[in-house]
Every structure is written in C-alpha cells, then in structure tokens.
Amino acid sequence: MKRLNRGKELDLIQHARLHDERAFAELVEAYTLAVYRITRRMVTDTLEAESIVQETFWRFWQKLPRYQTDAPLLPYLATIASNLARDRYRRERWLDDGDAENVLENRADEGPEPEAQFDQKQTLERLAAAVESLPIGYRAVIALRYDAGLDYEEIAQALSMPLNTVRTHLRRAKQKLKERMEADDG
C-alpha cells in the first residue's frame, strides 16, 4: 500500500478545497484501500466496513475547509474511520463471527503446493478469528499498525491516546494473539 508523496497530497487537498472533484477523487482512490483495511479489522461485516469507509470520506469532504495540513492525511482519515467503527461497535455490540477469510484478504503468499496453501489458509483463518476476538481497542491498534503501516506516533494521533498506551495496547494485543494461536495448536 503506497501513500501519496506529501507534496502531491497537499496539492490535491488544495485543489479539492476549491471544489475540484477530480482532485478529491484522487485522494479517495489513493486512500480507500488503507482506510478499508483499517476499518475491516475493526468490524466483522464487509458491508459495514464499506459503509464506514464511505462515511469517512464524506465526513472528510465536509471538514475539508477546516482540515489542517500540518500532518499527513492517512492518520486523519484513520481517526475518522476508527471513531466511526468504535461508535457503531458501542451502539450495536457486534457478536458476528464474520468471514475470517476476508479479514486478511490479499495477505496470503500462496505456496506452490496445495497442502501448503491449505495449511496457510487455515493459519490465516485462525489468525483472523483471533484478531476478531480482540477487544475493539486492540483491533484498532493492530489495524493501524499492520494494515495501514502507521508508526506509533501516528496511531496515537489517530486514536487520540498517549504514545505509551499505544505501545501497551499493541504489546497486549500481540500477546493475546500469540496465546490464542498457541491454544489452538495444542
């Protein structure tokens, strides 16, 4: 997942502020996959994730005149998406098992042997289920770190939490995933 270079991003934002729909469409195209991956980690339903992505960009469009360009755009979009996902989670308290195969879509490096492919698919499904079993806050830091590729400072900014809390959440989330995977193995 490749981010826009900062100069191009600022140029597109400036044009979008002048109601250049083409420039805004380029921003949407550049960041939709990243925002979707972040959101998909936090919600188990693909349609719900798509809805949150659309609402994220709609809210960004509304806030565009007031958007401060002193920070990269992806953490800002991640903040909007994660807040929407958390709000919906609190409101609905999803208990859906979801389609684990779709959670880590496009992440498998398929091996040449059918047996290896099957084993890898099972491992990814187990990992996806383990991620979905995490509390929403842990899923958020996992999504922002591994799907969006944000560094700890950007995650802290996106989730409005202290840097040490981000580190703690990430460490605890990885520990819970490790424990869950080990429990499934043995």
Image (cartoon, helix red, strand yellow):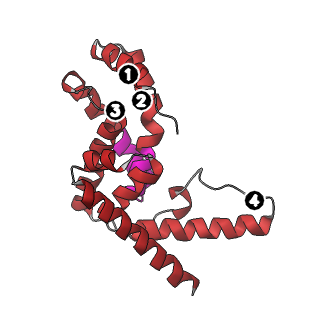
> Horizontally, is 155 left or right of 118 in the view?
left
Residue at the right extreme, as displayed: 113
In the picture, residue 158 is in which quadrant?
A: top left
Mark 2 in CB contact with mark 1 (< 8 angstroms): yes
Residue 171 position, x and y percent, is: 37, 67
Q: Secondary structure at mark 2?
A: helix
> Horizontally, is 59 left or right of 128 in the view?
left
Query: Disc 4 marks which residue?
Result: 111
Mark carried by residue 73 = 3
Magenta part of the chain: 36-53
Query: Disc 1 marks which residue?
Result: 24
Mark 1 in CB contact with mark 3 (< 8 angstroms): no
Measure how far apart labels 1 and 3 are at the Cα level. Answer: 12 Å
Q: Is residue 24 above or below residue 144?
A: above
> Horizontally, is 112 left or right of 130 in the view?
right
Measure how far apart labels 3 and 4 are at the Cα level. Answer: 36 Å
Query: Disc 2 marks which residue?
Result: 28
Measure how far apart labels 4 and 2 are at the Cα level. Answer: 33 Å
Q: Is residue 43 above or below residue 30?
A: below
- The residue drawn where x is 52% and y is 39% is 1
Q: Secondary structure at mark 4?
A: loop
Disc 2 residue type (three-letter): Val
Residue at the bottom extreme, as displayed: 186
Main SS category, magenta section: helix
Disc 1 residue type (three-letter): Phe
